[in-house]
Image (cartoon, grey):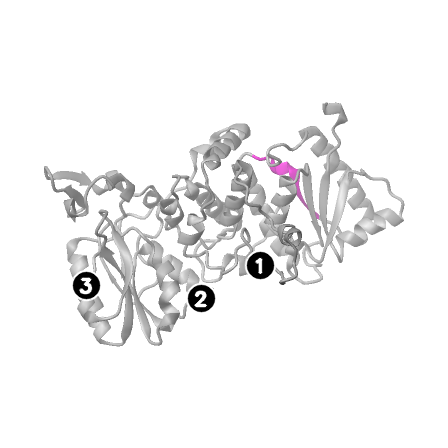
Amino acid sequence: MMEDFEPKILVFACNWCSYAGADLAGTSRLQYAPNVRIVRVMCSGMVNPAMILYAFRKGFDGVVVAGCHPGDCHYNVGNYYAKKRIVLLKEMLDFIGFESDRLKLLWASAAEGKKFAEEMTNFTERIRKLGPQTKFRG
Amino acid sequence: MDTETEKIVRNRVAELLNEDVEAFVVFVRKETEPRERITVIKGPEEAEKVALSPLSVNNTARVLLEVVNNFDGKVGVVAKGCDSKAIKGLISEGKIEREKIHIIGISCPGIVDYRKLIAFSPEDVIFEDGKLIIKPGDKEIPLEEVIHDNCRYCRSPSPVIYDEIYGKAREPFDGTDDDEIEKLPADERWKYWIDVFEKCIRCYACRSACPMCYCTECLVDPVNLAISPMSTAEEKAAYPRFLGKTVTPADNLFYHLIRVFHHAGRCADCGECERACPMDIPLRKLERKLQKEIKEIFGYEDEDIPFLAKLDIIPEGR
């Protein structure tokens, strides 16, 4: 059973940096794990913790929130909000006994297609080790 | 909150109502249970029924928020430490105008967990000199024995904002707030919380009682659905919402995590959620953990700027 496990990963990528980074990874024909599904959001700061929990609730094994580097945000401070939320959400997930490693905050600029591809592959491997997410799936 | 303080407060409420204060949010004794309820009085003649004791358990901020805009003039409020914290939060979030309220601050010795006294009739329980006296048999119970759990962790028993202040406060809690749950392995923690939230019936009493939960439309039950007379049942059913009406432990955990998250850096630590809970769920554990992390990671504690509005506190290496 475990051998057949293919993680499902949801990526919230911000419109201005990370989504363009993912696009660059595609146009540069870089290979990375096909397990990721990318949702384009206007800013990483609009990713509500409820959206992340909802993804887990619907059965995703891992969630990545990708945004611009600090200081580079198109809306100046959106990624700061994202960071604050994710740091706290990870602590709370840990507290209730959920593996907080399944959630990742990633800074990826529009020029970092290679980094994006590498991070996605690494994260997929990490989730593969953790196994299927059954706790929230309920 | 001895009888002395009660008398002073009663007199002050009557005086203020004779002056420029139009209405007062106060405690009065409940007829059916040994505790006080919150009410709004409008004339000095009503001031004689004002009560104040460690049985005044509830948070007046919530009622204040609901009634303050019904009056043109000033509204007075009797506020304990945690109540004043909630009022301060509401002022900083622009829900209440500071000039419109008059706060009688009460330094609080801690309040009673009224559920421990529910068996007694209201006339039988008297509070005197730091002890509860149960009339039949003159049994004395020290306050520390029946105190609300939440008060043991109270960091601000004295009001943080007030116009006048009375009473004697308990020692503020000073220490790190480590929960024994944190020491358990992850799987047992998960099991603990699932067991706890299995009980939750999602009545949303915690949300209704909370002074900081004032949104008219809540994330978990959207009421302003974009529907028209032509919308079909399927359309209404398929309207996107984060949380359905199912009551599974994972859904309940989802709701409570989001609820707690919305109080990040705003929680008044009054414990109203726990008191309102009909299923006795330790909701404050989640709130306390979040406040602790906010303090540890971001170094934020009781500042004048709301936590979420502060942007220069991104910690290093996280």
3 and 1 marks on the same chain: yes
Residue shown at 81%/38% (left/top)? A34
Expressed as whole percent of the image width and height from the top left, the position of residue A15 reads 75, 57
Expressed as whole percent of the image width and height from the top left, the position of residue B303 reads 45, 59
Q: Looking at the rendering, in which quadrant would you find the C terminus of chain B?
A: top right
Hey, what amino acid is under mark 1?
A: Leu
Give SS at disc 3. helix
The answer to which of marks 3 and 2 sits earlier in the sequence is 3
Residue B72's label in the rendered image is none
Regarding residue B93, the answer to whether it shows in the image is yes
The answer to which of marks 3 and 1 sits earlier in the sequence is 3
Hey, what amino acid is under mark 3?
A: Arg
Residue behind mark 3: B10
Residue behind mark 2: B95
Regarding residue B113, the answer to whether it shows in the image is no
Question: Are there few (<14), some (14-19), or many (20+) residues within 10 Å of tag 1?
Answer: few
Q: State whether residue B11 is above or below residue A13.
A: below
Expressed as whole percent of the image width and height from the top left, the position of residue A37 reads 76, 44
Question: Are there few (<14), some (14-19), or many (20+) residues within 10 Å of tag 2?
Answer: some
What span is in magenta?
A98-106
